[in-house]
Structures are given as structure tokens and as C-alpha cells.
Amino acid sequence: MTSQAADERVPDVVTPFTLGPTWKRGPDGKFVLPEYTLGWQCLAWTKTYLQHYVGKPWQYTPEQARLTLWWYAMDPATNRFLWRDGVIQRLKGHGKDPLKATWSAFEFVGPCRFGKVADEGNEWGVPPGQPLGEQHPAAWVQIAAVSQDQTRNTMTLFPLILSKRALEEYRIDLGKEIIYADKGRARIEAVTSSPRALEGGRPTFTSMGETHHWLDSNSGHEMAAVIERNATKSADGQSRTLADTNAFEPGEDSVAERTRDAYEAIEAGRAADTGLFYDSLEAPPEAKLTEAWIEPTLRAVRGDSTWLDIERLKASILDVRNPPSRSRRFWYNQIAAAEDSWMARYEWDACKREDLHLEDGDEVVMFFDGSKSDDATGIAACRMSDGLVSTLGVWQKPPNWPSPETPGYVPWSVPRDDVDGVVANACNRFKVLAFFADPGSGQDEDGEMYWDAYLDRWGQAYGKKFLIRAVAAGPRAHAVRWDMRDRRHQEEFTEAVKRAREDILQRQLVHDGHKVMRTHVINARRRTNAWGITIGKEHRESARKIDLAICMIGARMLRRTVLNSPKNAKRSTARGKGRVVVLR
């Protein structure tokens, strides 16, 4: 180990970042399993009818077994699957194709649909009270990808994993592109990016391979949309789709990227939960691409895939010919930043402190970014003592808001009274030393600036308590109003963007993990202006908001301004603080 590596504080065991129910543990430390699942029968059936090779029955790893149980989890009240569609995201070489091939075989000829509830002594050994399945009467499994090479990865597995017993009992006819069973009653077929040819089919299960390669340029999005429509109109409503992916390249707008964005929107409460199963095992945000970190990180990220050779992967990561972003994507399963991204997911996540919260009476500063309807409106606070950034409120158009073509359509606008209530509550709870508010450019029905009256009210009600004012003197003097269209303010904010990025990369900024703020930070793109690098949306009409990122940066800027202000120096001296630290 190099001296540099020896100086690094690396835990003996790296704890990975996880998504999905597969990784949840109970109070006893054991993994939580679904209460009611057809997965028990899937485990038994695959062991009976599938094989690793001739003479060795199929056996899932513990991780794969948990995935099976959760993917086939059901609602005991309706006996319907909990998940409508799903995604498994793992590092390259994890074994996603073989796992999905076993589930495809189960959907092809196995007892993959609810039949009855198991009792004691059933032939499959399924625990009593769990669902027992039956074959689908007309199973139609599709192995979908945007190239034949990708479908071939899965299709070539079936002749290997289907045992002689399976071939004989289910009368399976193996083919390269289509596999039939029971004289054509059931089939598995490989399909590639021809959306029109897919339209109208009624598959019972669709395996979508490597969706990080599904792009607009290869009809990937159109193909995904057709597959979703076909599954939706299935006769029993139980047709499902399951995708596998490596960490995607941000900014490519792949199907994988859109799906991850959708999942995170659901988790943040910004979109309805439509039954999306998402399971991922990723390197933690703090993991570095250094010799000391690589081995424990790879052991964590590979999970049960012990067939992956750590030393070989380590050599690839340390090879200077391989870009760090590629190593993070392929071997750490981390979503690296897009070329023009301001901040990567793992960089922001490394600053999360869920144990820290704002407390009543805390000294804070607040920053408000206002809009009427198109953009989000947000308020963030930054605690003076430790710089903790916290979201006080965010308002943006609900995802299910009617379109303008809908009869009786009413445009959405930010509920100003709700925002006013959040401001009042914050000013009552905390000792607010400064509050800057950018009003935006929206106008109300009378042609007045949408937020001006509220900014005036906030300045009059709370401004006397502030240590510094937004505009201290002159005809535009105001306790709160800080219009970012002003060139001087643009210059100040550009410097604040630089400072905030440095603080994040050096782990000098802490935040409470608010999910919408995280999304807005990730959405932010680097933009050049007269003073350097600032942030902006990916394009003017983009639905990917960044307003809470602006609030976060503005709040950090305000904290620095207050700490460096003469009034704060006098206040600190009067309170006997001893010395004043000036932040540059």
C-alpha cells in the first residue's frame, strides 16, 4: 500500500448505498422478506426444472433469492403482484442476464400466476398461507433489447439452464429466435428495436435488456413506450416488464436515466407511486478510486457475485487509460455526472447528515427563489453554527396537473398564502439573521409582479430583526428583495456557486438529505457568464427544476456574508466570543 493510501481513513468493511426492499433489515439485523409472495414457489420450481449445468440444479445466491421473493411479492387482499414493472441496476458482470433468464423461464412454463393459497404439505414445500401458482394458459415472454447482440446474451442461456426434465415435461422446442412449449401454446421470443412491429402484442412478461443503451437515436424510448402499452392492456392485468441496467451515462436521456428519475420523483413525493420496483447496489458516495478504497468497495458492490475477480477489476480502475467516470459507472455502479453537470449524485450524497435537524431557536439565514408557475418556488435555510442546509418548503406544479387541452383547464400557480405561512413559521421558530428573496419575473392577473407584495410584507414584518438587509441603501433599499437580474447580484451569486462547489467537494457543507433538493442539485448544469461559472437548467423549457439548488447556494452565500459582516463581529465581541473568524 502506498503512503498516500495508508493515510486514508478507509473502513475495514465498506457499507454500500442501496435502493429497494431487498436490502431492508429489521430490528434484529436480518433482511426483511415479503409477507406474501409467489417467490417461494419460484425458488422451488427453478431448483427442480433449471440447472447451472447438467447434473447441478439451479441454486440462487442469497441476494438473488431475496430479489426473487420481492419481485414476486403479492397483495394478499387481491392476489395481484405489488410491482407493475421493475429495474435491477448492478455493476457490469454481476450476473443480471442469468437471473432474468431464470425468471423468464418461470414465466414461460412455470406456475407464475396465482392459483390458490398453500396449505400444509404441498408438493412444492411452500410455507402454508403463501400463494401457490399455476401456469399461464398462453404464456408469451419477450426478451427485448435494441440490438440482436443484447438479446442473444439472454437467448443463448435457455438451452443451458433448461434441464432435460423441463424440455421433456413441457415439450420445449428450442430455437435461436423463438422457443416454443406445449405445441406452441407458450413461447419465448427475442425482439429488437422495431416499435411498429411490437405494437399490438399481448406479452405476459417482457425482459428489457441493458436499458442504459435505449436511446432516442435507436428508437429505445419508442420501444419502451410500446412495451408499456402492451403490458397495460394484458387480459389479466398481470403482465409485467423488468429491465436490467448498469449505471447510466447522465445526459444521454436513456430509458434507464428516465426510469431512475421517475423512481426518485416517487421517493421524493413528486410523482404518484405506480408500482415501480427498483433495486440497486452502489458504492457509497464517499468511496474513492484509490488503491486503499478499491478492494473493500468492490467487495461491497459486487454483493453475492463472488465470481467477479477483485484484482482484475482493481487493475482496470487503476489503469490511467480508463477515465474515472467510466470506472465509477461500470465497477462502482455509481451514476457519474454528465459532462456539463454542476455536481454528481455521489458528491452531493457524501455531504448528507440525516441525524442533523434545525431546532427551535437556531440562528439561521434564509434564501427564497420565487416563480409563478413554470419553475419551482423554494425556500432554504442555513444554520449559522454548522452550516447545515435544510429545505423549508418547495412548490412546483404537480405531475398529474391537467393539460391546457383539458376542458375546464385552470392554470397552476404557486399558492402564495402557503408560502407566506412557511415564512411566518420560520421567522417565529428561528432567529433569522438575514433573508434574501429573488422575486422572479412572473406577474399576477393585475399585471403586478407576482411576489412583490409578499416581499414587502416580509420586509416590514421581520426586517427590523435582520442583521443585514438585502439592499442596504439607495432607492431600491429593501430588507428582503434581492433580484438576481441585477448584475451586481449575478456577480455575487456566481462567486457563491464557486464557493458552494468547493465546500461540497471538500465535505465542508452538510445537508439533511432532502430528496427534492437533491434532485434539483443533480439537475443543475454549469453555465458561463461574465464572472465565471454559474448554474442553470439544461435548457430553458426543461422540466428538470434547479430552484432549490439556487436556494441552497444562496443560503450558503448569506451565511458567509453574515459571518464576515462588521455587525456580526460587534455582536460576537459583545457576547464574549473572543475572536472572529473571517471566511474568504
Image (tube, rainbow, N blue to C red):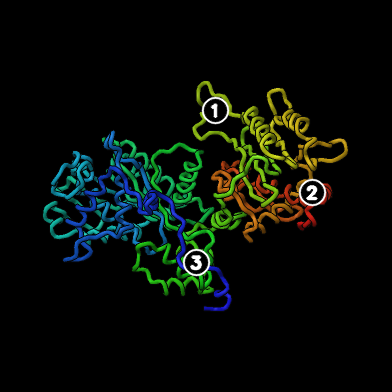
Reading the image, the residue beneath label 3 is 11
Residue 228 x %, y %? 37, 41
Q: Is residue 493 left or right of residue 174?
A: right
Q: Secondary structure at mark 1?
A: loop
Residue at 68 percent of width and 49 percent of height: 553
The residues tagged by marks 2 and 3 sit, at their Cα atoms, a distance apart of 41 Å
Q: N-terminal of the two: label 2 or label 1?
A: 1
The residues tagged by marks 2 and 1 sit, at their Cα atoms, a distance apart of 58 Å
Question: Counting other residues with Cα less than 10 Å from the Cα at mark 1, is it few (<14), some (14-19), or many (20 or more)?
Answer: few
Q: Is residue 283 left or right of residue 482?
A: left
Q: Secondary structure at mark 2?
A: loop
Residue at 46 percent of width and 60 percent of height: 15
Q: Is residue 536 left or right of residue 225?
A: right
Residue type pointed to by label 3: Pro
Residue sitting nearer the eye, 163 or 352: 352
Q: N-terminal of the two: label 2 or label 3?
A: 3
Q: Tell me, for residue 104, which label it has, or none.
A: none
